[in-house]
Image (cartoon, helix red, strand yellow):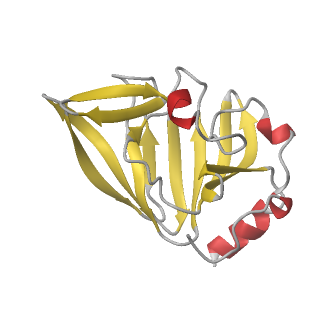
Amino acid sequence: MLSKWLFAVSARLPCRRIDRAPGKRYLERYFVGQLFGCRAYLHRFVDADRDEETHDHPFSAVAVCLAGGYDEERLTHVDLPGAPKMVLRKIRPGSINRIRGGGLGRGDFHRIVAAKPETWTFFLHGPRVSSWGFLRSLSSVVVYVHYREVVRAVPPPFDGATLPDWELRAPLGRDADRAPFGGCQ
C-alpha cells in the first residue's frame, strides 16, 4: 500500500503541521527538497479546507495525487452582483492538478471540500510571485482578504503562514505529533 510507505518515508523528512485552529489538523507538509528555485513537498491531507472561502497561492504549483483523493472546488468566474461560480473537480491517484499563482485576477482560487483517508500528493511550486488570500462573499460583492487578516486570530504555530526556511527548524515527521496512520479526522 503506497500510503503506508509514504507515511514511513515521511517519518524521516522535516514536517510542518498546518492547522486551521489550535487542535484542528488540516495538512502535514513534508519538505522533500529544492532545486532551481522550485520547492518539493509531500502533502498528507488530514482534513478538508473547511474554509467557506476559496484561496489562491503566491506561486504556481503542480500537485500529483499519489494516494487517496480529494474533491476540489475551483472558481470559474464571479457573476455580478458578486456570486462566485464554482466547478467541482475530483482529484484521484494519478491526477495532476495545476494551480496558477499570481494574485488576484491572475491566479486560481480553490478549496478542498473533501479528502479521502490517507490522501497524499507530491506538491511542487515555483518562486513566490505574490502574496495570497481568500475570496469572501459579503452581501452582493466579493472581497479579496489578505491571508494575514484571516489567520490573525489563530496563534502560531497554527497560523498556516509561510515561514522562511521552516524546514531547517522543523521536527522530523516521527517527532512532529502527526496524525496517526489511517485516515482523515
Residue 137 vs residue 32, the one in the foreground: 137
Is residue 105 toward the left or the right of residue 68 in the image? Answer: left
Q: Quadrant of the N terminus?
A: bottom right
Q: Position of residue 127 (x, y in %)?
A: 61, 25
Q: Position of residue 29 (x, y in %)?
A: 67, 50
Q: Position of residue 118 (x, y in %)?
A: 58, 70
Q: Residue at x 43, y 23 (%)?
A: 103
Q: Residue at x 47, y 62 (%)?
A: 94
- Residue 119: image quadrant is bottom right
Residue 77 vs residue 19, the one in the foreground: 19
Q: In this rendering, is residue 156 above or below 142?
A: below
Q: How many marks?
A: 0
Q: In this rendering, is residue 69 above or below 43?
A: below
Is residue 59 shown to the viewer in this render?
Answer: no
Q: In this rendering, is residue 184 above or below 19?
A: below
Is residue 24 shown to the viewer in this render?
Answer: yes
Q: Quadrant of the C terminus?
A: bottom right
Residue 106 vs residue 37, the one in the foreground: 106
Q: Residue at x 63, y 77 (%)?
A: 182
Q: Residue at x 77, y 69 (%)?
A: 8
Q: Position of residue 5 (x, y in %)?
A: 71, 72
Q: Find the residue positioned furthest to the left.
A: 80
